[in-house]
């Protein structure tokens, strides 16, 4: 037996990245891709990762992950969330700021980053708040936070209601080169809302969340981008009209990007007829027509990224009437399979929406979503696009169980994940 | 039938069967000793997470007339206020041996959720804005007897007036009346209607004056004062002027028309006229019928095999 080397060789796979698709084996040494070739013969002592029938791609980047730490460790910790991310093929996640305390200070974002480093399963990039405490009244310290490495700012969970404040936020943030990401929701239109406003909520006797509440704020912010010239990203867009508005604004050349979640292109508001709070999410599940539009937006690139809005909640909080249960559902471990199964798009379009396009939005394009090429950082996902599996809540790595896909048979499973050249997942098992 | 959660789950035939059984329960209720041993040994627990003395008392009376054991679990005196979850509450009480829960909850869907945590039958006694199926059944029974419509409501014109959006009574009544063949018109300002009426078997009218002369049944809903806090109406006075039943409108009602209200009434708001001065008022009849309808429901859910006990008297 030979002494182990530091080299990992991924054999038998098909490489798909932004430069194209080719059959290739990939060697990784010292955290970087050291060789890409149609046939690599592993040397004695190399670690061999089998990838027959698999796709080898840049690792995925989630723009929208709720890791719950600090403050709600009962639902998730940075470690458990990072493990779920790695198992989903992610090498980087942007941690949402609605922690307790909120991520509106250098101390908190550095804590989150450090906990991510300790877990070692995924690069955890804390977002910052747009306003102090996500309360919508005073600007958060963007310059200090940007100096601490924060690139994406959002009050996610809340939309910034005051247009004057949002204008100042964009004006102040613009020169810092950061991106402000909006949770589009006009609060006065969604008071008490638990689901999409339409025929279903009317029948079920539940307060509705109208599509308009998202679209009005999106429209306002597109106009503020036009006024200020500062780039904006739009979180979890859920309506057909939103997709149309983003398409039109991009055609005008405005610097905006947008994301959509797997649940918004797979599930409709009809699911709420069960009154099962696992289907309660914000923004809410919408209609079949909205799903068609979101999918079309992802396929034609209007929507840049698939983001999970992974939102863990402990079971007892979801075993409650809809108006009492918190919104949100798990997403990290099912996103790839749902994207592969539901989007009628070429593989590189799907991977782009999971990897290099969100990496660019998160300001991580130098590290993540890189081409699989010699000298590039070895942040890689290896997945079998045909592998069928059943979503079993108990099998998920997340600390919570609130997946709306329990029992669903899906296709596409991550086999290996490499983070800076180190395997975090091997044969679908987390390595830490 | 295991549960009664929503009128949506009932066919016209099932509604008719319950109403026919109600005839029998009315007969029992009119006896000198209005009590039969049909549900002897059955345990019926009222679980009211929202105050409602009249509905709770009505169910309680119904259960007692059938000789069921009854237990009241009111939220104010319960462990719910100590932070116990709905699931734990249900599982705990179920462990004492419960055949049926009669559930009132301010959240739509709560009775449906509860079915997964107990083997007992669940009777929805009103959930949020969603459903109040026994109210709809007693309303159907009141119309059936009041207008002598034993075979159904074909051709009947029923107007439901008021806060449909927030009304579990309206959601149940629309489905029940339409299922029995009536033509239902909702009469309300747009702010008090649900955001979508797609799939509802109704017509809509925004002026009570346009429909009042043509209806066989005028069903007035309670307008809660909190709707003012939500800013859905400019004022209760304006609502009353345009949607209240006053003497002028009452005079335009057809002689045979029934006036109904689920209670409690807001006098001076939706009921400007004193119902005592309305020959067509069936408001107290509704309350009386409520007990008999709830007897029919409890017996249907719990009385399998005890049909003979409906004949005898309780010992």
Image (tube, rainbow, N blue to C red):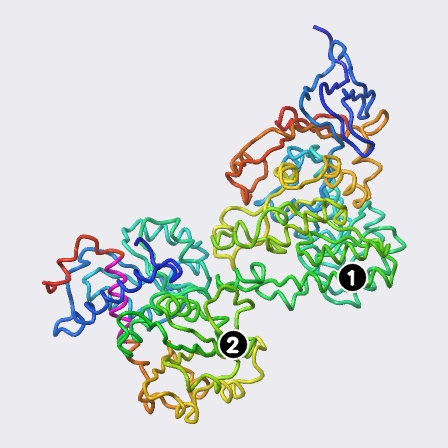
Q: Position of residue B127 (x, y in %)?
A: 42, 64
Disc 1 versus disc 2: distance between alpha carbons? 34 Å
- The residue tagged 1 is A221
Q: For numbered disc 2, what is the local secondary structure?
A: helix
Quadrant position of residue A239: bottom right
Neighbor class of circle 1 (other Cα within 10 Å; few <14, some 14-19, many 20+) is many
Q: Which chain carries label 2?
A: B
Neighbor class of circle 2 (other Cα within 10 Å; few <14, some 14-19, many 20+) is few
The span picked out in magenta is: B288-300
- Identify the residue at horizontal 30%, vertical 54% (top origin): B1
Mark closer to the observer (1, 2):
1
Residue toward you, A119 or A430: A430
Q: Where is residue B80 in the image (x, y as percent from the top left)?
A: 42, 59
- Identify the residue at horizontal 27%, vertical 56% (top origin): B301
Q: Residue B226 carries which label?
A: 2
When the figure is inspected, residue A355 is found, relative to residue A157, above or below; the finding is: above
Q: Which chain carries label 1?
A: A
Indicate left or right for B54 with B106 as reference. Answer: left
């Amino acid at each position: 037996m030979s002494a182990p080397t530091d080299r990992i060789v991924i054999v038998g796979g098909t490489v798909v990245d932004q430069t194209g698709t080719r059959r290739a084996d990939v060697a990784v040494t010292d955290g970087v891709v050291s060789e890409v070739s149609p046939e690599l013969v592993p040397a004695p002592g190399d670690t061999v990762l089998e990838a027959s029938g698999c796709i080898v791609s840049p690792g995925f980047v989630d723009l929208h992950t709720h890791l719950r730490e600090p403050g709600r460790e009962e639902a998730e910790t940075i470690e458990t969330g990072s493990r779920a991310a790695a198992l989903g093929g992610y090498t980087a996640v942007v941690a949402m700021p609605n922690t307790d305390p909120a991520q509106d200070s250098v101390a908190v974002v550095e804590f989150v980053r450090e906990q991510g480093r300790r877990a070692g399963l995924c690069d955890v990039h804390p977002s910052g708040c747009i306003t102090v405490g996500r309360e919508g009244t005073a600007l958060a310290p963007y310059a200090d936070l940007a100096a601490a490495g924060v690139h994406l700012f959002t009050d996610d969970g809340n939309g910034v209601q005051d247009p004057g404040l949002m204008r100042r936020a964009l004006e102040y943030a613009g020169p810092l080169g950061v991106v402000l990401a909006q949770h589009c929701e006009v609060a006065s239109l969604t008071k008490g809302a638990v689901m999409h406003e339409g025929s279903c909520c009317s029948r079920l006797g539940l307060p509705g969340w109208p599509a308009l509440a998202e679209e009005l704020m999106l429209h306002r912010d597109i106009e503020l981008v036009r006024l200020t010239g500062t780039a904006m990203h739009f979180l979890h867009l859920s309506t057909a009209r939103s997709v149309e508005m983003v398409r039109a604004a991009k055609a005008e050349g405005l610097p905006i990007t947008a994301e959509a979640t797997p649940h918004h292109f797979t599930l409709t508001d009809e699911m709420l007829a069960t009154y099962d709070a696992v289907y309660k999410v914000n923004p809410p599940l919408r209609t079949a027509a909205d799903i068609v539009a979101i999918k079309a937006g992802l396929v034609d690139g209007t929507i840049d990224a698939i983001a999970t809005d992974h939102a863990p909640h402990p079971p007892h909080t979801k075993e409650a009437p809809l108006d009492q249960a918190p919104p949100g559902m798990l997403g990290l471990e099912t996103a790839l399979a749902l994207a592969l199964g539901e989007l009628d798009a070429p593989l590189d379009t799907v991977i782009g929406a999971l990897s290099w396009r969100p990496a660019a939005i998160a300001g991580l394009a130098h590290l993540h979503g890189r081409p699989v090429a010699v000298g590039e950082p070895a942040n890689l996902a290896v997945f079998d696009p045909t592998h069928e599996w059943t979503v079993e809540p108990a099998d998920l790595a997340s600390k919570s169980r609130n997946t709306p896909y329990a029992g669903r048979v899906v296709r596409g499973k991550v086999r290996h994940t490499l983070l800076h050249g180190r395997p975090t997942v091997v044969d679908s098992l987390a390595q830490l | 039938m295991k549960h009664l959660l929503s009128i949506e789950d009932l066919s016209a035939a099932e509604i008719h069967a319950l109403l026919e059984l109600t005839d029998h329960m009315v007969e029992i209720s009119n006896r000198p000793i209005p009590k039969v041993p049909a549900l002897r040994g059955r345990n019926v627990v009222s679980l009211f997470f929202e105050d409602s003395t009249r509905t709770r008392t009505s169910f309680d009376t119904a259960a007692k007339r059938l000789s069921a054991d009854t237990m009241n679990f009111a939220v104010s005196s319960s462990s719910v206020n100590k932070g116990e979850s709905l699931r734990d509450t249900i599982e705990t009480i179920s462990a004492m041996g419960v055949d049926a829960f009669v559930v009132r909850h301010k959240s739509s869907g709560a009775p449906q959720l509860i079915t997964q945590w107990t083997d007992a039958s669940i009777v929805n006694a009103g959930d949020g804005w969603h459903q109040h199926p026994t109210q709809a059944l007693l309303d159907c029974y009141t119309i059936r007897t009041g207008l002598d419509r034993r075979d159904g409501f074909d051709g009947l014109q029923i107007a439901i007036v008021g806060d449909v959006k927030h009304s579990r009574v309206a959601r149940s009544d629309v489905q029940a009346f339409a299922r029995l063949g009536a033509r239902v018109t909702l009469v309300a300002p747009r702010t008090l209607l649900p955001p979508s009426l797609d799939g509802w078997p109704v017509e809509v009218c925004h002026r009570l004056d346009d429909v009042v002369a043509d209806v066989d049944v005028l069903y007035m809903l309670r307008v809660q004062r909190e709707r003012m806090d939500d800013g859905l109406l400019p004022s209760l006075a304006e609502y009353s002027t345009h949607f209240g039943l006053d003497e002028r409108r009452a005079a335009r009602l057809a002689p045979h028309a029934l006036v109904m209200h689920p209670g409690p009434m807001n006098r001076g708001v939706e009921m400007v006229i004193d119902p005592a001065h309305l020959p067509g008022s069936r408001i107290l009849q509704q309350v009386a019928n409520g007990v008999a309808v709830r007897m029919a429901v409890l017996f249907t859910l719990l009385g399998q095999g005890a049909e003979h006990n409906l004949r005898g008297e309780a010992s």
